[in-house]
């Protein structure tokens, strides 16, 4: 009987020890009270869903990133999508999670919620930046004529940056256009082999740009063509005018989002792709010359400029050359646009 009692006491002691042991182990673990994650993604509009395009890292050593899962449905990213993911975190040995949402910091994403599977496994739900802030991939680009380049429109592109090259060297400044084509004629006034490359800039976030895409074909300009282009783009520039440019450019209000000709209550003005406009000077636009007053509005009729008079069409506003002006004055202007007295 005494032997049975001893055995029962031993078993009872063992059961109590077994029950207390996990609590002692847990009590010896350290709390993880905050999270600090960084997410980088290479998601593309029109691209397939893939967690390979999402990288989640942590700056702390007491837990690590496990599985990443995409929650969106559809299979391909649309410009209207906001990517949503779950990230599973695991505590390292000797640690357990005890985190409140105010202590969750995520660079490259927004914390939505957290769920503990157990004290050592935590699943976070996170949204990534909207696909509207991504830009589609540049497709094929090509020469549509000897001087004009073109490409397919890119989803979410606000405008395109284009660079022209002659014999492998850059020509002129970086061009910015909203259309899916550009005429380089005014820059192709020297003999040589020309190429170009283009990239798309996101409509909402200008820091987001596609990869450069270069045309496989080239355009060769011989000496005769170069001379013709010099004549086309230079002959109607009065010798006493300032060089084409924007010497008195003004910065545009941010609320404007369109480029090119714009009409408001005061008249017509022209917004350049670099977010500026010409004021108190001439500017060549699509091969024609226009004069803008000190406020930046297009001027029509007779214009006195540096001791000579020029005439701009009363409707279209472009400077007239080599003709009798149809205003009843009988005045004639030469090939530079100046009045022949």
Image: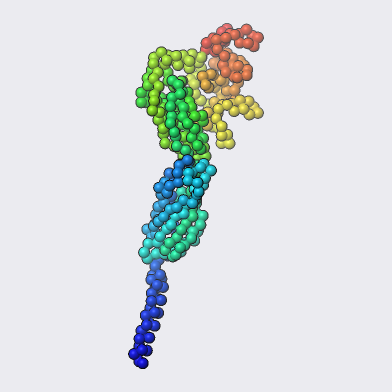
Q: What residue is at 54 percent from the left and 19 percent from the top?
A: 289
Q: Residue at coordinates 51% horizontally, 19% vertically from top-left?
A: 287
Residue 188 % position (x, y)? 42, 20
In the displayed image of the protein, which residue is found farthest to the front? Answer: 74
Q: Residue at x 55, y 27 (%)?
A: 260
- Is the residue 309 above or below the residue 82 in the image? above
Q: Compared to 280, does 159 lie above or below?
A: below
**Residue nearest the viewer, comparing 28 with 113:** 113
Residue 19 is drawn in which quadrant? bottom left
Residue 316 appears in the picture as rendered: yes
Residue at the far bottom: name it.
Answer: 1
Colour scheme shown: rainbow
- Left or right of residue 39: residue 275: right
Viewer-proximal residue, 315 or 115?
115
| Residue 240 point in image, percent of width and height | 50, 15
Residue in the image at 39% along x and 67% along y: 29
- The residue nearer to you, when weighing 238 against 78, is 78
Image location of residue 179, percent across then percent down: 51, 29
Residue 46 as seen in the image, left or right of residue 327: left
Say whether residue 130 is visible. Answer: no
Question: Quadrant location of the N terminus?
Answer: bottom left
| Quadrant (top left/top right/bottom left/bottom right) for the C terminus | top right
**Which x, y percent locates residue 6?**
35, 88
> How many numbered circles does the render carry?
0
């Amino acid at each position: 009987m005494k032997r049975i009692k001893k055995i029962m006491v031993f078993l009872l002691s063992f059961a109590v020890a077994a029950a207390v042991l996990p609590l002692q182990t847990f009590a010896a673990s350290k709390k993880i009270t905050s999270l600090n994650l960084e997410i980088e993604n290479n998601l593309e509009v029109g691209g397939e869903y893939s967690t390979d395009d999402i990288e989640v890292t942590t700056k702390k050593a007491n837990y690590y990133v496990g599985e990443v899962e995409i929650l969106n449905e559809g299979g391909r990213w649309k410009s209207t999508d906001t990517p949503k993911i779950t990230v599973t975190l695991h505590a390292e040995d000797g640690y357990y999670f005890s985190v409140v949402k105010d202590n969750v910091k995520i660079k490259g994403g927004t914390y939505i919620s957290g769920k503990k599977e157990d004290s050592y496994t935590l699943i976070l739900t996170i949204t990534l930046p909207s696909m509207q802030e991504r830009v589609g991939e540049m497709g094929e680009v090509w020469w549509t004529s000897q001087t004009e380049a073109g490409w397919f429109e890119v989803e979410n592109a606000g405008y395109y940056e284009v660079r022209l090259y002659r014999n492998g060297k850059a020509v002129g400044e970086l061009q910015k256009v909203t259309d899916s084509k550009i005429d380089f004629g005014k820059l192709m006034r020297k003999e040589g082999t020309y190429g170009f490359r283009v990239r798309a800039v996101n409509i909402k976030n200008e820091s987001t740009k596609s990869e450069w895409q270069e045309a496989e074909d080239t355009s060769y300009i011989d000496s005769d063509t170069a001379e013709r282009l010099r004549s086309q783009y230079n002959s109607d520039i009065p010798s006493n005018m300032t060089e084409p440019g924007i010497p008195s450019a003004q910065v545009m209000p941010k609320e404007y989002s369109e480029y090119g000709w714009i009409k408001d209550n005061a008249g017509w003005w022209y917004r350049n792709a670099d977010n500026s406009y010409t004021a108190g000077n001439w500017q060549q636009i699509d091969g024609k010359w226009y004069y803008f007053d000190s406020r930046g509005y297009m001027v029509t009729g007779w214009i006195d400029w540096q001791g000579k008079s020029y005439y701009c069409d009363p409707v279209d506003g472009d400077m007239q050359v080599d003709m009798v002006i149809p205003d009843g004055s009988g005045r004639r202007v030469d090939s530079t646009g100046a009045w022949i007295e």
